[in-house]
Image (tube, grey):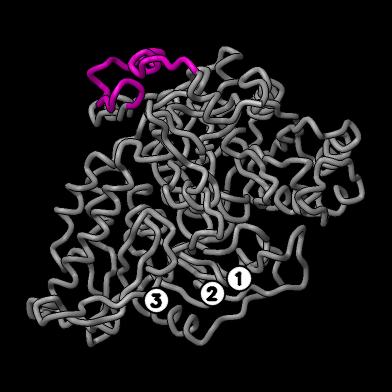
Amino acid sequence: MKTDIQIAQEAELLPITEVAAKLGIVEKELELYGKYKAKLSEEYMEELSGRPDGKLILVTAINPTPAGEGKTTTSVGLGQAFSALGKKAVIALREPSLGPCFGIKGGAAGGGYAQVVPMEDLNLHFTGDFHAITSANNLLAALLDNHIQQGNELEIDTREVVWKRCLDMNDRVLRNVVVGLGAKTDGFVREDHFVITVASEIMAVLCLASDMKDLKERLGRIVVAYNYKKEPITAADLKAVGAMAALLKDAMKPNLIQTLEHTPALVHGGPFANIAHGCNSVRATKTALKMADYVITEAGFGADLGAEKFFDIKCRISGLKPDAVVLVATVRALKYNGGVPKQELSAENLDALKKGIVNLEKHMENLKKYGVPVVVTLNGFVTDTEEEISFVKEFCEKKGCEFAISEVWEKGGEGGEALARKVLEVLEKGEGRFRVLYEDNLSLEEKIETVAKEIYGATGVDYSPQAKKQLKSLADLGFGNLPVCMAKTQYSLSDDPALLGRPENFRINVREAYVSAGAGFVVVLTGAVMTMPGLPKNPAAFAIDVNDEGVITGLF
């Protein structure tokens, strides 16, 4: 069996100018990054503004397991299926982070015959957007420390610096560091911290900004520290906005690539829905809606994380209204949720499937709370039996959700046509009435508890003394009207990764809260989730290599 990267490397790519031409985009409206990648120009995006919007389809999934779910694979395959059916479709995806690519995942470009290409570029440096974000973030950190060194006119309390440096790599030793050691000219000694680039506020700002003017306003609102009077100090106070915006100028433009079957794909911004925004950029999604009749997008991790943030943050801020949701599951992952070890998932086990399907059930219930019709799809494996598939199908239909098998990994667009037809049926009914889960005027604690109870299924929320104090302070500073960005493990509906299926009688533990004022939300850390992940004992990096001819292996 060919690996994902072998399939991708054997594919015949069209020049990106030819892919763009299918959408009526001429070469002068592109900014080319080699033969197969391009950014859309500002002029082109302005030209689109008068066009009507297409239909927006969100792809999400059950909670991730070691068995895999295939959310990106399904997104890509569904886009290819729409194209195969003669529909004008564009895929809008998140950009992979280097950290997971070298840590656990090896990549995030889909799989099998449902991939976006060039996948090596995508999983490595791509067009440099993440480097620009990293640089802008660390420029702000440098200007902050320099301000303190140069006399500290703003009277920043160095014990109350909240801005962290960032790096696009999982590196646990950087979580807590000391800076400023050495001579007097090397700065004031203080404790500092790093986050992974995709968990940074700059990433969220880039993803949620509508244009350059909005970007600069958001950058200016970023809170970096507090002064001795407990007043917030912003990036605007540090005169950092112009230079940061200059670094982000090109990164603001969505990237155009293609699938293996040459369906256009916009890839731009924001993975890591357990600790950050978790969706592609607002600009990419809105641009795609003007470019095509059907837009397939995705949100990170399970529906309790990515989809919740997509609805309650991205759609709230941008005004986007999804028309349908595709919820991805696999028989293997459901059996894992039912207690079967990873090495035994290939064997038929209806009892375990019945136990584990409660995870899917909860996600189906959750998505319906947003007023959007749900289509459940099983990402098919050769080990799935007819009895197992029939059980899931009947379960979904009894719960009022449409159902379809997806075979896109094996068959590409052709394997997704049944799913595409089912989605088209749902869209034609036009039953979607999107709504957010909570209103802006609730308190931060009420918003947290709404998500914890309604989405996770918790009985309540326990706050650390620190979190209580932080939430009160944020409300007093005028941030109480913002939505909450819940940072939680992706492996469970609870904040304990060991609790699989549909946990009951548990409480969510909130240990910290802080404002991302530029992004426009309050981040709430629960359980032991890390904003700077570490590497496992055998990271994916061990398997990645490049030969004498420059051919990369090990990415997937």
SS class, disc 1: helix
Going by the numbered disc 1, the residue's amino acid type is: Glu
> In this picture, which residue range is highlighted in magenta?
11-37
Q: Is residue 207 left or right of residue 385?
A: left
Residue 372: x and y, percent? Answer: 63, 42
Residue 383: x and y, percent? Answer: 81, 34
Going by the numbered disc 2, the residue's amino acid type is: Glu
Instruction: Give the residue drawn at x 30%, y 65%.
Output: 165
Residue 463: x and y, percent? Answer: 56, 81
Image mark count: 3
Q: Quadrant of the N terminus?
A: top right
Residue 222 is one of the magenta-drawn residues:
no
Residue 18, placed above or below residue 422: above
In front here: 443 or 375? Answer: 375
Q: Are marks 1 and 2 in contact (CB under 8 Å)?
A: yes
In front here: 114 or 550? Answer: 550
Residue 19 is one of the magenta-drawn residues:
yes
Q: Name the residue under label 1.
A: 449
Instruction: Give the residue drawn at x 65%, y 37%.
Output: 326
Distance from Cα at disc 1 to Cα at disc 3: 17 Å
Instruction: Give the residue drawn at x 63%, y 76%.
Output: 461
